[in-house]
Image: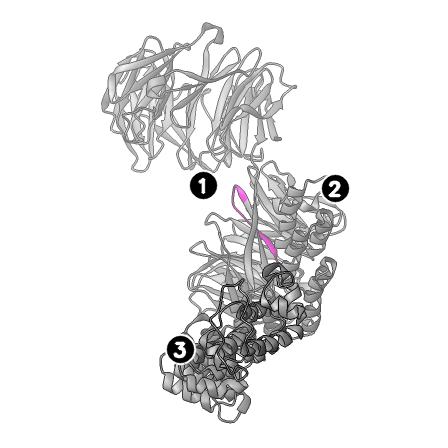
Amino acid sequence: MKRVFSLLEKTWLGAPIQFAWQKSSGNYLAVTGADSVVKIFDRHGQKRSEISLPGNCVAMDWDKDGDILAVIAEKSSCIYLWDANTNKTSQLDNGMRDQMSFLLWSKIGSFLAVGTIKGNLLIYNHQTSRKIPVLGKHTKKITCGCWNTENLLALGGEDRMITVSNQEGDTIRQTPVKSEPSDIKFSTSKTDERISSAESTISAVVGKKMLFLFHLNEPDNPVDLEFQQAYGNIVCYSWYGDGYIMIGFSRGTFLAISTHFPEVGQEIFKTRDHKDNLTSVALSQTLNKAATCGDNCIKIHDLTELRDMYAIINLDDENKGLGTLSWTDDGQLLALSTQRGSLHVFLTKLPILGDACHTRIAYLTSLLEVTVANLIEGEPPITVSVDVEPNFVAVGLYHLAVGMNNRAWFYVLGENVVKKLKDVEYLGTVASICLHSDYAAALFEGKIQLHLIENEMLDAQEERETRLFPAVDDKCRILCHALTSDFLIYGTDTGIIQYFFIEDWQFVNDYRHPVGVKKLFPDPNGTRLVFIDEKSDGFVYCPVNDATYEIPDFSPTIKGVLWENWPMDKGVFIAYDDDKVYTYVFHKDTIQGSKVILAGGTKLPFSHKPLLLYNGELTCQTQSGKINSIYLSTHSFLDSVKDTEPPDLRQMLMQTLMLKRFPDAWDICKMLNDRTSWSELARACLHHMEVEFAIRVSRTMGDVGTVMSLEQIKGIEDYNLLAGHLAMFTNDFNLAQDLYLASNCPVAALEMRRDLQHWDSALQLAKRLAPDQIPFISKEYAIQLEFTGDYVNALAHYEKGITGDNKEHDEVCLAGVAQMSIRMGDIRRGANQALKHPSRVLKRDCGAILENMKQFSEAAQLYEKGQYYDRAASVYIRCKNWAKVGELLPHVSSPKIHLQYAKAKEADGRYKEAVVAYENAKQWNSVIRIYLDHLNNPEKAVSIVRETQSLDGAKMVASLVTMDPPSSFWSCPNVTMKPSPWLSSTTRWKSTPTSLVLKTQLMRTIKASPYILKEKRDIFRLENSSCCVASIHGH
C-alpha cells in the first residue's frame, strides 16, 4: 500500500487532530487541529480552502452527497456550512444560546441534527431551511448520535439516556443505560423472527466496557455484552456482514462477535493485532477490508477470512502513538491521524485504469502517475506524471492520452522520455478514448469525434483532420467504439456496427444486429471482432463475409474481451468477468464451417483486470497499481512436459488440439507414443482441413490408405469439395453431402451415397443431379431390399430400373421382377418372366423359390427349361410324374434320382426298366436281386457279381446253390427238367441227368469265379463240406 501524502502543520503539533472524508466521492478531506481553522485538502494533499472559526472545532460532518460540510466550534452559536461546489462558506444561526456539542447529517435526507451541552436538539432541513428546535431532549450534554435509513435519530448523553426521535424531533423511544453512552450506531441484527431488513437495532458503548444492544421492536429486552477485563476499554466497533460486530480494545485485542439470536455475543474471531495498544478500527464495505492501528503500524484484514492478513503498514517515524483511521466511501484512500498532530493518507485501492495497443500497455500506478511498458519486446517501463487524476487512459503506437470529464491530455512516447503534446477539450464528458498511429477517437454523449493527434504529422486536407459521428440526420446513439490502424469501428443502440475506412475517409461496411450493441472488441488487424449486445450475448463478427457466430456459454457478467497478440494464435480470445477468464477459439476453416468453441476457464485473482494476452500469458492490472501475469489453464502445455504423467499429457494434447497448435500436439504425441493419441491428432487435422499435416501424421502411423487418399485430394482448391472429402473421411456423411452440394462438383454427393449404399438418399440426389442414373440406382437399391426381405419395394425398384436400351442392365432388372413376383405370390407372372428370360441361373433360382413354395409343377418346368435335369427330375418325382422323369433320365446324372425311379418301376412290376435304372444308379445288389428273383437270369447275375465283385451279390448267388430254388428258377432256359424236391442244406442232390446239367452249369460259373468261394470259406465251408457242390468240384 502506497502513501499518497502526509500533512504536518506546525499549528497542529502537540495535539490530536480531527478529520473527515467527503462522502460519496472522497475528493476532499477536512482537517482541523488546535488552531481553530478547518482546512480542506483534495485527495492529492493540495489545500483547496479553509474555514476560520472563533474557537476550536467541536464537530464536523459531510452531508450524504458530499456537497456541504457542516462545522460547529467553541464560543459560537453558528453552524458553518462550506459548499464544495462553489467553494463558499455560509453561517447558520442555531437560534439557541447553548454551546453546541454534537452535529450529524442524515443518511438519506438533507436533515442536520445539532445537540447542545444542555441536552437541547436542533433539526435543520437544509433543503427547505426549516429549523426545528427541541428543548429538553436530554437533561445533560448530548455527546453522540446516529441516523438510520428511515430518518430516525438516536442520541446519547451524559444523562445516561438513549433517545430515539423522528425527523420532526418527536421522541419515539428512550431507554436508560448503566453509564455514559458513546459511539451510537444503527444496524440490523440477525434474528430468526426478522422479516424486514430495516435498521431497528441500536448499539452503543456504555462506560467504555460494555456493548449495549437495544431493539426498537423489543424495548423491554435490551442486551448488555460484557467482555474480559484483560481486553481493556472498547476503543471503537463496527457492524459488518449479516449481523456481526467487530470490536477493537485498547490493549490490542481485535475480535468479532455474532448477534444472531441463539448466539448473541459469541466470539467468532479473536486476535491480538497489536502488542501494546490499539487506537482505532475502520471498515470498508466496498473493499471488504478491516483496518486496525496501534504500535506504530496499520494492519489490514480481509473480512472474508479474518485470519488472513492482507497488508501491514509500518510507521516508524511516529513515536507518539497513532490516532484515528478512516476510509473513503470507495475504499481507495485510508487516512490516519497521529497523536503528534500529523495525518497520513494511503492508497489502498487504485482505480484500475489501463489500456493496451498491440503489446504496449499503459496503466495507472498512482493517482497522478501512468506507466507505459512493453514487456513482450523488452522495452523499459516509462513513468508519466499527469496533471489530473484521470478517469480514462488510452495508449497508441506512439501516443498516450489521459483525461477526465471533457478534457484529454496527449503525450508523445519516445524511447526513454515522454513529452506532453497538447490537451483537447471535447463537446461532452468523455466516456472512453481510443488511439492508434495518427488518429484519436473520443466517445462522449452518444457521439464520436475522430481527429488527428498531431495536425502537423500529416499533410492532410482540412476535412480529414476531424469528423463527428454519427451524421446529424442519424438518430442513433453510439454506445461503443474501437480504433485500428485502418478502421474506426463503432456500435449503436439500434444494433448497427459501422466500419469507417480512415484512408478513404468513408464507410465501407455495416452490419445490422437485432438489438443494440453495447461493447465491441476487434482483433489487432480489425478483420474480426467480438461484440456484446444489450442482451449480454456475445458474437464474433467477420466483416469479410458479413457473418456472425454466437459465442457458446457466454456469461452475462462478462466485462471485457482480449484477443491473442501472439501471431500464431490469431483466432484465440478471452472473455473475462470479475472472477474468471474464459478462453475461446474462433476456428475459421473447419469441415463444419467457421465456429467458436470454449476451450476452458481460468480463475482470475481478486481485483485483477486483464490488459494483454500474449501466447497464453495474461498480463493483469491490480488495485495496487502493479501488473501481474498469470498463465491460462488452457495453455498448461507451454510449461515443461518432460516429467509429466501420461494422463496429464493426454489432457495437454486435448488443449493443443482445441487451440489448433498442431506442432505442440506432435511433440506430445511423440512422448505418449500410442496410436490413440496419433489418431486424435490425425482426426483434428482432418477437422481443421490441415491436409499436409494429416498426411504427415498418417504416414507416421503407417496408415497407407489414408495417406494415399489424402494425397489424391490435397490439391483441390474448391473449399467445399475439399471439406466434403474430409468430412467423408471422418464418417460425417450428412455433412459431407451438404458440402458436396455446395461445391462446384455436387455429383460427388451422389457418388458418395452410392458407394455407401445409402440408396434412399442416392435416389433423392439423382432426381436433382443425374436423372439418367435413377434406373441404375433403383436396381442396386432393389438388390439391397431383396436381401433384407422387403420384396414389395424391391419389385417396385426393379420395375423402375428397366431402361429399355441397356440389355445387360435390363436383364438383371427383369430377373429381379420375376423373382419378386414369385415371392409376392404372382406365380404366373414370375414363372412366365423367368421362362422368357435367357438366364439359366434365373430359371434355377426361380425354380428353387417355387419348390420351397411347394409349386412343384412350375418349379420342375423352370428346372427343365434351364437344363437343370437332375433338379427337374427330382421335382417330377415329388409330384409323381414318372413319365416326365423317364423322359429326363437320359440327361440325369444323379444316382439318387435313378434309384428313386428304379424303386418306383420295381414297385410297378416293370423289372426291365427297373434293372436299367438300378444299373444307372450303380445299385448292383438290386440289379443282381432283380436278375435272380424276377428276371430269372442267373448268368447275368453271376456276370455282374464277377464284374462288380459285390460280396452281397455273391451271397445271393451262393444261396441258390444250397437252397431249394424258387419255382421261377425252373423257367430258366438252361433247365429242361424239373428235379426231385430239394433236400435240406446238407442233403446231396440226386444224380439225375437234369440235375447234373444244372450242377455242371453252376459249377462252370463257380469255377470261373473261385475267388467268391475261397473268400467265403468261413461262411459256406464249400471246400470241406460234403455238399454236392464239393463233390462236383472233386469230380
Q: Is residue 711 above or below residue 931?
A: above
Task: Report x, y in % for residue 117.
Answer: 34, 15
Identify the image quadrant of residue 621.
top right
Q: Which residues are magenta?
A: 571-580
Marking on residue 85: 1
Who's the residue at 62% across and 74% down the image? 1003
Quadrant for the C terminus in the image: bottom right
Which residue does the numbered mark 2 point to in the structure image? 642
Who's the residue at 59% across and 46% down the image? 610
- The kind of residue tagged 3 is Arg
* Magenta residue check for 548: no
Which label lies toward us, 1 or 3?
Answer: 3
How packed mark 3 is, by other alpha carbons closer than 10 Å (few <14, some 14-19, many 20 or more), is some
Give the mark, 1 or 2, whose residue is nearer the N terminus: 1
Which residue does the numbered mark 3 point to in the structure image? 823
Give the mark, 1 or 3, whose residue is nearer the N terminus: 1
Give the mark, 3 or 2, whose residue is nearer the N terminus: 2
Q: Are marks 1 and 2 in contact (CB under 8 Å)?
A: no
Who's the residue at 37% across and 83% down the image? 827
- The kind of residue tagged 1 is Asn
